[in-house]
Image (cartoon, helix red, strand yellow):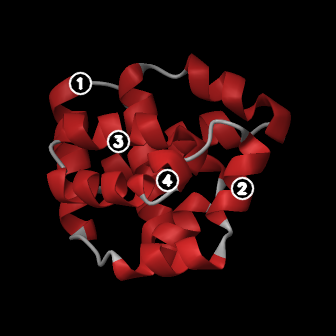
């Protein structure tokens, strides 16, 4: 990843989390589509390399799992898309609950965590390369 791209990822991340937690969703919704894609895929990547799918699903950003799937598809990261899609299908009813409390209970279930670990992995370096190529092709956002 280039320094410029890392700076953009950090700037997008700060737009959301550099505020009280109760403002995060509104700030996320104020991002452009490209910024949301950068935010969702970067957060997915960060949690994945830090602890796998189990770590992703026990973090705030996983509330955007549907948006993350669409972003992975848009950037052409089909390997990561397939893995996240399979992971979502492991939840009761075939997808994570829309109710945050219920979702948190589901995500923290030890049985589900074991199934998530068994899914294997994907090329996380290639994922970020695809994200950077997507960002460059979109022409925004840029750092000042």
| Mark 4 or mark 1: whose residue is earlier in sequence | 4
First in sequence: mark 2 vs mark 4: 4
The image quarter containing residue 63 is: top right
Q: Give the labeled residue for mark 3.
A: 69
Which residue is label 2 attached to?
104
Q: Earlier in the sequence, mark 1 or mark 2?
A: 2
Mark toward the viewer: 4 or 1: 4
Distance from Cα at disc 2 to Cα at disc 4: 18 Å
Q: Which residue is mark 4?
A: 43
Q: Nearer the viewer, residue 136 or 80?
A: 80
Q: Nearer the viewer, mark 1 or mark 2?
A: 2
Callout 3: 10 Å neighbours few (<14), some, many (20+)?
A: many
* Left or right of 103 in this view: 75: left
Query: Badge 1 is on which residue?
Result: 139
Along the horizontal axis of the image, is 16 left or right of 92?
right
- Quadrant position of residue 143: top left
Task: Please indicate whether residue 99 sits to the left or right of residue 73 in the image.
Answer: right
Task: Indicate the position of residue 141 as horizontal and vertical percent values.
Answer: 37, 27
Name the residue located 43 percent from the left edge and 80 percent from the top edge.
Answer: 117
């Amino acid at each position: 990843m280039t320094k410029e791209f890392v700076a953009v990822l950090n700037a997008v991340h700060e737009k959301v989390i550099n505020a009280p937690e109760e403002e995060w969703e509104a700030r996320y919704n104020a991002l452009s589509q490209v910024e949301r894609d950068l935010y969702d895929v970067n957060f997915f990547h960060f949690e994945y390399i830090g602890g796998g799918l189990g770590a992703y699903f026990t973090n705030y950003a996983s509330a955007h799992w549907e948006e993350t799937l669409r972003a992975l598809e848009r950037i052409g990261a089909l390997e990561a898309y397939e893995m996240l899609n399979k992971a979502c299908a492991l939840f009761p009813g075939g997808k994570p609950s829309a109710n945050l409390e219920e979702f948190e209970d589901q995500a923290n279930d030890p049985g589900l965590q074991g199934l998530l670990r068994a899914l294997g992995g994907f090329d996380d370096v290639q994922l970020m390369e695809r994200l950077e190529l997507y960002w460059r092709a979109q022409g925004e956002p840029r750092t000042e």
